[in-house]
Image (cartoon, rainbow, N blue to C red):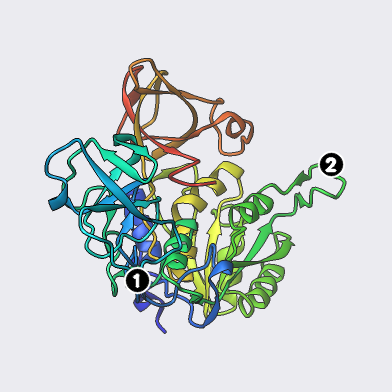
Amino acid sequence: MNKNSDPLNPLGGEHPLISVERARFAALAGVLSITGSERIPLAASLGRVVDENVNTSIPLPPFDQSAMDGYAVRTQEVLNVPLSRIVAGRIAAGQYPDGLIYPQNTVVRILTGAAVPSGFDAVVMQELCHRDGESVTINHRPMAGENIRGTGDDIHAGDRLVENGTLIDPRHIAIMAASGVGLLKVRRKINVGLISTGNEISDSTESLWPGGIHDSNKPMLAAMLTRPGIVLHDLGHVIDNADVMAEAFASAAGSVDVLLSTGGISVGEEDHVQAAIAARGGYVDPLRAGIKPGKPAAIGRLGDTVLLALPGNPLSALVTFLWFARPVIEKRMGMTPVMPLAVRAQSSFGERRRPGRDEFVPVSVKRESDGGLTVTKLGRGGSSRLAPLLSADGLARIAGHLESIEPGDALDVYLFNSAFAL
């Protein structure tokens, strides 16, 4: 395939920096979902991606159901209150009064969740009644349907419960369980490989040598990718040598659906990732996103494996993973990625800046007495700094065209516990 006709290379050629959103769109444009599925018990489906549309065969509730502890009545028999009626029976949840005939001008004691007997069209809550032996005084005139959950009020038979491509969470499990779904067809688990590059890198369990650093990128990415539907492959780290890298990438590409690397993707003398992959018949092209930190992020392919090359500095790796790599992996899993949701907050800081790229900075968030949010920038900047993340609630976005930020300016903030769900 000609690289310039490849859907994973929609930009082609030389282009200036583009918006973060456009780069994200370009990264997703040619990514295909994995194939292959399995049918598993619903109880084991948390975090898996559905590979079918799931409809219900039964309505919810499946029968007219009392929403209160009280007394089932026929509204046409309760026109003037207060009035006294004989209690002709009692129905608790799990009992079904099929075929029972209750005399006219009587009521039935009924508990929450119980089936409403045929012919009765309202439930008067017990707080509006006074029980005296075998009779009860009704002190409220009900409307038809009052305190009754009608058959199918929640879900009609045949309604769609879950769309193909949905990532299953506890909400989906609850409604499918209520609808009697026992087995679920899901996509197979996706294989994701992680490689760190650099002569200076060592595992955190190893002793440092002069000039060396512990690898933080791979453990960070692994933590963010620990999901039930993902099988992670720690492929170690490779030195800054094009031949060694070429062998490592080629070996990994045959066993994983997505391969993430960190480092070696810029234009320095020891940045060999692009050349190493090209040597084995693949490619990675820069996304050219106007993003700071993280501009060198690139996407490509080697065989059937989607490649994501992220920068080596930790904050750069984090930002580019959240904006580009995570949605690519989600699409490969069979999901439809959605844009992260931003909240608006006021800056509590001011600074001059060089315009050009949208900058994402760690911030703490405070809710003010008027309900508004204010953000404080953490740390002194720099893509290699990890300490600011420890106190950060999210990332504030400073638009690339701005030459300065003033206290009180409005910023978009991406909270870690919602938009990016770290």
Q: Residue at x 54, y 31 (%)?
A: 392
Rendered location of residue 185, percent (x, y): 48, 78
Neighbour tally class for label 2: few under 14, some 14-19, many 20 plus, Cα within 10 Å? few
Neighbour tally class for label 1: few under 14, some 14-19, many 20 plus, Cα within 10 Å? few
Q: Quadrant of residue 56?
A: bottom left
Q: Nearer the viewer, residue 146 or 373?
A: 146
Res 88 label: none
Rendered location of residue 4, percent (x, y): 36, 75
303 above or below 376?
below
Camera sees residue 392: yes
Circle 1 sits on which residue?
Answer: 98
Q: Quadrant of residue 155?
A: bottom left
Q: Secondary structure at mark 2?
A: loop
Q: Secondary structure at mark 1?
A: loop
Circle 2 sits on which residue?
Answer: 210
Q: CA distance from mark 1 to mark 2?
A: 82 Å
Camera sees residue 14: no
